[in-house]
Amino acid sequence: MPADLETTEESGRLAEADPAAVSSRALERGIPQLGTLGSGNHFLEIQKVDRIHDPATAAAFGIGPVGQVLVMIHCGSRGLGHQVATDFIDEMLSGPLPPGLPDRELVHAPVRSPLGRRYYAAMSAAVNYAFTNRQMIAHWVREVFAKVLGSSVGLRQVYDVCHNVAKIETHDLDGRPTRLCVHRKGATRSFGPGRREVPAVYRSVGQPVIIPGSMGTASYILAGTVAAEALSFGSTAHGAGRILSRHEALRRFRGESIRDDLARRGIELQATSWRGVAEEAGEAYKDVDEVVRVSDAVGLGRLVARVVPIGVMKG
């Protein structure tokens, strides 16, 4: 939908993208996966508004009243993005390694070097793929609502926001505006009121910040803050965050037991893989209520609304 561009970060396109920097293997992986959720913690969730914490900002976002139905989509650049990262990590590892590198996957290249520029161009292309991926899924969601309910009127996009991305941005550093490469791994942007990058429709209140929960829990909508720009270069968490690795979750939990526990709470679970259910056990993640409480308390994001799941589809 054309109107979605206004409420998509970067208007849905990183201009620095160069498809020529993306390997043929990445393209082979990405082409058949376009328009798909993917696995892991990616999801499509039908939700309802459970609580409004900031009525004025919620109204600016088009959220409310309590009981309103929303659809939240969490997915990214699929195998294409993963392959882009793999390709450039391998290339960076093939050269001289920085001294004291604690983990091979923290290898890097100077952002202005030829290798750094190629990686940024390929990563930007993967970001654009992710925007396209989510837009396709959103389009099909609207089609399904129109088919089942007779209309998709009112199913407007609140915000499409990046996560796991590096971007060139201007921030205050030692009292001076400075161009920086800001890395947000497991994080999302949280720009406050007045930033030119925030869509005009939200510029008076700050950008929407989406923090999804884990399986069976609530999710939250926050607003970006000026304080976050000083505290964290305008960043906050993009989800509850894991406290257990997938390997450890498999060791501790059984998918069938999780199914039975959810059934006792009146939640029906169907799965093609009990292993995948165990990997995404709610206990493998932090308490999203506490994550959001802390984000709000320290000023990384301002709490706007709490939403709870009605139905969830995992990739």
Image (cartoon, rainbow, N blue to C red):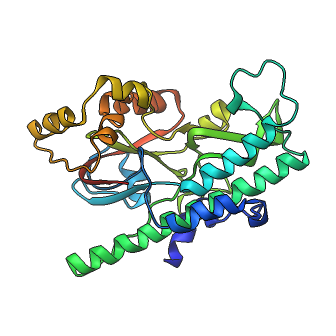
Q: Quarter of the image holding residue 277?
A: top left
Which residue does the image show at 84% across and 51% down from the upper left? Answer: 117
Q: Nearer the viewer, residue 277 or 200?
A: 277
Q: How many marks?
A: 0
In the depicted structure, whether residue 208 falls above or below residue 125: above
Query: Which picture quadrant has residue 250?
Result: top left
Residue 62 pos. (x, y %): 39, 61
Residue 166 seen from this side: no
Q: Position of residue 211 (x, y in %)?
A: 43, 43
- Horizontal relation, residue 142 to residue 48: left or right: right
Residue 195 drawn above or below residue 28 = above
Q: Position of residue 239 (x, y in %)?
A: 45, 39
Residue 107 visible in the shown view: yes
| Residue, far top | 100
Q: Quadrant of the C terminus?
A: bottom left
Give x and y (percent) for residue 161: 54, 54
Q: What residue is at 44 percent from the left and 61 percent from the top?
A: 158
Q: In the image shown, does 67 or 77 lie closer to the viewer?
A: 77
Q: Is residue 237 left or right of residue 265?
A: right
Residue drawn 35% across the image and 74% down it: 142
Q: Is residue 226 left or right of residue 223?
A: right
- The residue located at (72%, 59%) in the rendering is 23
**Left or right of 111: which side holds 267?**
left
